[in-house]
Image: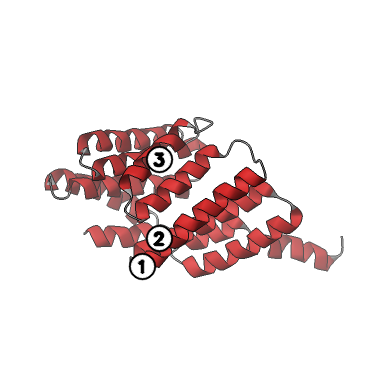
Amino acid sequence: MNRLALFLLIVVVPLFSSERADSLREAGKSLEAINLYNQEIVSAIEQGNDEDLITSMTGRLLAWKHLFYKTKEPVYAIFLKHQAAALEEIIDKKEILGRAHLVHFIKATAAQNLGELEVAEREYGLSVELYPSDAAEKGDWIAHWGFIIALQGNIEEGASKILMGISWIDERSDQIDSFIRNVWVSGAYLRLAQIYKEAEPIKSAHYLAQAKAIIDSDERLVIRKTQLESLL
């Protein structure tokens, strides 16, 4: 391998990877992340790499979700809904096995941002039920499910699921990067703070403090810091 080829392998590939796009997304640089995801999607299609295609499409969808959270622009929620449908169609057409749980999670995310809470609760429930392993990520999905349950009035049931999700993640924290763990757990505590904000302000403040401790300890949590400031 000549020096130029080696340089491209070392420098260029990481630059356009989904991992790099994930980092930009969580740093609040949604547009830059979307641009990288688009390049990764095209590359995955050209190489026939279905795994990278699904991963990049999922990451791009989450970047659109962050834009929706930031601006409350309903157009972004519509993007989410149609990209979720596209992801489901691609998985079906390519007969990619073992991804039903992801389809339901993405559909739940889109429904949540469109205010379709009953649909979101059903889809989150299916995503957890169909999750194919005991990975730490499943705890994050349980916490999302609990939040939607709480938003529909079942606060204690929802809070119980969120706390279950946090425990699930922490019991398996050795499986994941500390940044991912902090993203998931701080997000779960912020949801607990939100659902108790009106009904039980003291309990809300307790969970907010736990979220703040994690967020303040990790400067990479740019999105979470913005969400924290909004709740404060």
What's the residue at 25%, 45% (across, down)? 151
User: Which image quadrant for residue 28?
Assistant: bottom left
Residue neighbourhood size for the residue with mark 3, other residues' Cα within 10 Å, grouped as few (<14), some (14–19), many (≥20): many
The reply to whether discs 3 and 1 touch (Cβ–Cβ < 8 Å) is: no
Tell me which amino acid carries mark 1: Glu
Query: Label 2 belongs to which residue?
Result: 77
Looking at the rendered structure, the secondary structure element under dot 2 is: helix
- Give the colouring mode of the picture: secondary structure
The x, y position of residue 24, in whole percent, is 51, 63
Query: Label 1 belongs to which residue?
Result: 73
Cα distance, mark 3 to mark 1? 23 Å
Relative side of 162 to 123, left or right:
left
Query: Label 3 belongs to which residue?
Result: 124
Q: Earlier in the sequence, mark 2 or mark 3?
A: 2
Is residue 171 or residue 132 the one in the foreground? 132
**Residue 222 visible in the displayed image:** no
Relative side of 34 to 216, left or right:
right
Cα distance, mark 2 to mark 3? 17 Å
The x, y position of residue 42, in whole percent, is 67, 62
User: Which image quadrant for residue 44?
Assistant: bottom right
Tell me which amino acid carries mark 2: Ala
Which quarter of the rendered picture does the N terminus lie within?
bottom right
What's the residue at 54%, 31% (across, down)? 132
Tell me which amino acid carries mark 3: Tyr
The reply to whether discs 2 and 1 touch (Cβ–Cβ < 8 Å) is: yes
Cα distance, mark 2 to mark 1? 7 Å
Q: In this view, does 136 lie above or below 225?
A: above
The x, y position of residue 47, in whole percent, is 75, 55
What's the residue at 52%, 37% (across, down)? 175
